[in-house]
Image (cartoon, grey):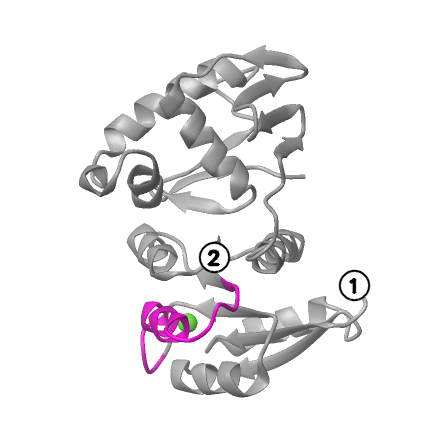
Amino acid sequence: MTDPTRFVVIEDEVPIRKFLRASLAPDEAEFIEAGTGEEGIRLVARKNPDIVLLDLGLPDIDGIEVVKRLREWSKVPIVILSARGQEKDKISALDAGADDYLTKPFAIGELMARVRVALRHAGNLQPEIEPKFEQRGLCVDFESRQVFVEGREVRLTPTEYKLLALLARHAGKVLTHNHLLREVWGPAYEDSTHTLRVHMGAIRQKIEPDPARPRFVRTETGVGYRLLVE
Ligand code: CA
């Protein structure tokens, strides 16, 4: 990175803000900190950050409300920092327009990997779409609609392909059950998580060397799925 990445961190827990500031070199990251949602929204508007890290449990307004308000006028990537056991909140935040979430406590390496994915997606908003996804032995060719594992072609049904291609286009990001169902099956199917699970199981049988221990598609329990990247 040449320019430091400018973060707005909206988080009321001072130790977490301190941890973040201490973990990253000043030439890599510039931290602007807010302890409340209202202050955070104001700072995002004024400072034009590259990325926002957002806690859901804030003293004034809910983090999900912050996501909704930011999305009225900003496309800035938003990564949620959430406490354990709030799957509903994570889903609401992602559906409201957040890009990703991390569960506390998190490792700084994991956070930075998610930040890089979110920044890459933000930079890719207008551009040509890559003709294929290729990583870690999995190749999804969007032009020919073929899938290869370690160079060998795998035959997917049209629905299975749609599902895997959607995850591959957003590789590294978690996509919620609702999002996947809406995009692949249509809005009437948003509650059909069972259908989704069945199809994901079928895809895993075909692409995963060990379907019980998936290497490509990770289950984000209660939330959705994520195609893993390096
Ligand atoms: Ca909090």
Q: Residue 6, position in %: x, y?
A: 65, 74
Q: Residue at x 56, y 57 (%)?
A: 126
Residue type at numbered disc 2: Asp
Residue 220 visible from this viewpoint: yes
Residue depicted at x 48% and y 62%: 81
Span colored in magenta? 59-78
Q: Does label 1 or label 2 sit earlier along the sequence?
A: 1
The amino acid marked with disc number 1 is: Met
Alpha carbon of mark 1 to alpha carbon of mark 2: how far? 21 Å
Contact? badges 1 and 2 (CB < 8 Å)? no
Give residue 150's mark: none
Q: Is residue 77 magenta?
A: yes
Residue corresponding to mark 2: 99
> Does dot 2 land on a helix, a strand or a loop?
loop
Q: Which residue is mark 1?
A: 1
Q: Residues within 10 Å of mark 2 (few under 14, many from 20)?
A: many
Quadrant of the rendered image containing residue 140:
top right
Ligand 1 image position (quadrant): bottom left
Q: Is mark 1 within 8 Å of ligand 1?
A: no
